[in-house]
Image (tube, rainbow, N blue to C red):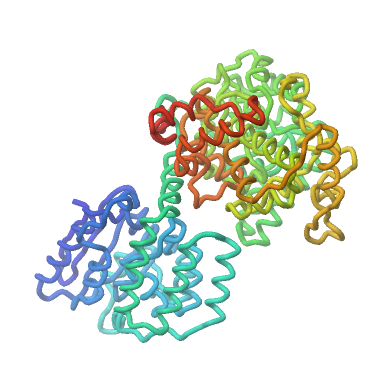
Amino acid sequence: MSVEVRREGTVAFVTLSNPPVNAIGLEVRKGLSEALDWVNGQNGLSRVILSGSERAFAAGADAREFDADPVAPHLPDIVARIDACETPWVAAISGVALGGGCELALACRYRIASPSAKIGLPEVTLGVVPGAGGTQRLPRLVGLKAALDLVATGRPVSANRAEEIGLIHGQADDPVMLAQHLDLGTIALEVAISTLPKPTANSDAVEGARALAERKMPNQIAPKRAIDLIAASATMTLEDGMAQEREAFLALRRGDQAHALRHIFFAERGARAPDRIKGAEQPLDHVAVVGGGTMGAGIAYALLNAGLTVTLLETDAEGVTRANENVEKIVAASLKRRLISDADAQSHRAKFLATTDYGAAAKATLAIEAAFESMEVKKTIFGMLQTHLPANAILATNTSYLDVNEIAACVQDPSRVVGFHFFAPAHIMKLLEIVEGSQSSDAALATGFALAKRLRKIPVLSGVCDGFIGNRILARYREAADTVLLEGAAPWEVDEAMVEFGYAMGPYEAQDLSGLDIAHANRRRQDATRDPNRRYIPIADRMVELGKLGKKTGAGWYRYPGGAGKVEDPIVADLAIEEAHLAKVERREFTAEEIRERLLIAMINEAADILDEGIAASAADIDLVTVFGYGFPRWRGGLLAYADTLGASKILEKLKSFAQEDPLVWTPSPSVIKCAQEGSSFAQLFGKGT
């Protein structure tokens, strides 16, 4: 039974029972409809208590149904029946009450939550608006500004905040128990929200919400539509507002953005350890981190935040001092932003030790090397780790490009070695590439997935190649951008074209932030193995020679006068013109669409090669890497989800056209050719685990 009912005296209990999170799918809606019929047939009831599990009151609608037409009974009708029920309903909320779960609670006359509960309306993050009264009942209850804060951002609130704004009436460790024993003689149950007056108009709050949505979720339709609906609640009747909300919900859920956002939502939920390695992980308690620079400190803090003991290993006293300072900076910043409490900060400090003594990590079950990107440095470190750590400890490298198999070869038991590619800043970025070496054991891989779960990161399994999944696609993206730069575009024109597509910033501004010297060092590493037949564009090398390393030096692809925002730099444009002359390239103008097309097709073709070579397991994994590691717009679903909207035939046609200019770099991937010949999508050809 997806909904259970029972009666004790004058109290009826309606319990959602659809593990794991009580998603409100068709069977739950049917169960609620039947429960309403049952309640209406009971005599002498004082109240109906609606509850779920300890983990979830209800985590919202079942998004798997959104690709099909709606099937009755519909949630808005169920919510309306609860709202109008003669016997008052009381929501007893534990865990999460999200989306439709929150709307069910709004239909109740009284709402009690456990202190750990989270309540919200996150529909805009899936490309839709609340569809069962969230944009109309909520502002009548809490006012326009508080409703906008919840709905337009999609961020849930804590029980404390929910009580502050009037979303719930109170908190209890056992909400069901309190709901059952409310003294109706002294505590009058509230009137139905549908009978409350319209909220007071608040143009400042509405404009503020629109500005925030434009800044945080540019190009996305749902947040703006949600804001319009909430603003309209101040002037419309509930009935008219509900009709407009339902129309908007149904239209949006059929749209491309909602489809793409659902795809990435399910891809994220499906990112877990393969069945073949489940249960093989090492226990995680004490972790060693080697290197206390920006990356190592971020990894250490992420581990501390997950409750792990961390020993950070450095080469000398100066390194130890730097490591302590770097970790403390993150602790202080987290305290300032109220991401952790004073007690959390003290716990982090107590569980952290920076030292030069590898023996201090003798009980660690996992070591993560985050040292300088040098093969010799890493081999030295791994030799020391195998000497001092237990024989069964997993040894992971955070390398971004280097050969994991070559690193593993310096260890007596190479099966212990695996790659954990964190993304900077490591304590914030959600992606973790787990790189499987040719001899990586099930235990090593499973420990990576277990760590990702502990750190609340999204794990993606990658094979060994230069740059793995993400950096390999990034390298092709930058190469295509540099080609366009040489042949006629300016860096700011390239950046503007990609920002218009949905990136937060283009490739050149991103390089200015990371530092041009980093990419330069990687190019020098590749010099010995670079294909001499592949055109090499030295503009970025010239930039480094001129000391233009990016924002940290005040000038890179852009200039940053006085630490202010970026401005265009004519010197860079002149460099491109000069290099084009030396290469005997006749420059031309590119439209923004032509720039986007070339960069995106280049990335898609590289991703297809990565799938064809077995470096990535699925098209969905490519999408996760590009969205969570490299800023590909989430609302487009990821790189290959976007490719599937273009179609393989169109992609192949473009590749053949570009190949007339440079056959080597634009050779169509066998996977693109196969998809085009079979009329299939990347998602179909490279489904999860295939």
When the figure is inspected, residue 607 is found, relative to residue 639, above or below; the finding is above
Residue placed furthest toward the top = 412
Horizontally, is 476 left or right of 139 in the view? right
Image coords of residue 130 (percent x, y):
38, 65
**Residue placed at 77% from the left, 38% from the top?**
586
Front-most of 285 and 562?
A: 562
Image coords of residue 153 (percent x, y):
51, 64
**Residue placed at 47% from the left, 85% from the top?**
201
Front-most of 531 and 546?
A: 531
Residue placed furthest toward the right = 546
Q: Where on the picture, by quarter, is residue 287?
A: top right
Q: Can residue 349 be seen in this view?
A: no
Horizontally, is 533 left or right of 431 in the view? right
Image coords of residue 58 (percent x, y):
33, 58
When the figure is inspected, residue 663 is found, relative to residue 498, above or below; the finding is above
Image label count: 0
When the figure is inspected, residue 546 is found, relative to residue 145, above or below; the finding is above
Front-most of 662 and 445?
A: 662
Q: Is residue 129 visible?
A: yes
Front-most of 664 and 318?
A: 664
When the figure is inspected, residue 113 is found, relative to residue 420, above or below; the finding is below
Q: Where on the picture, by quarter, is residue 407?
A: top right
Horizontally, is 150 left or right of 526 in the view? left
Give the quadrant of the C terminus.
top left
Horizontally, is 259 left or right of 382 in the view? left
**Residue placed at 56% from the left, 76% from the top?**
207
Image coords of residue 596 (percent x, y):
61, 46
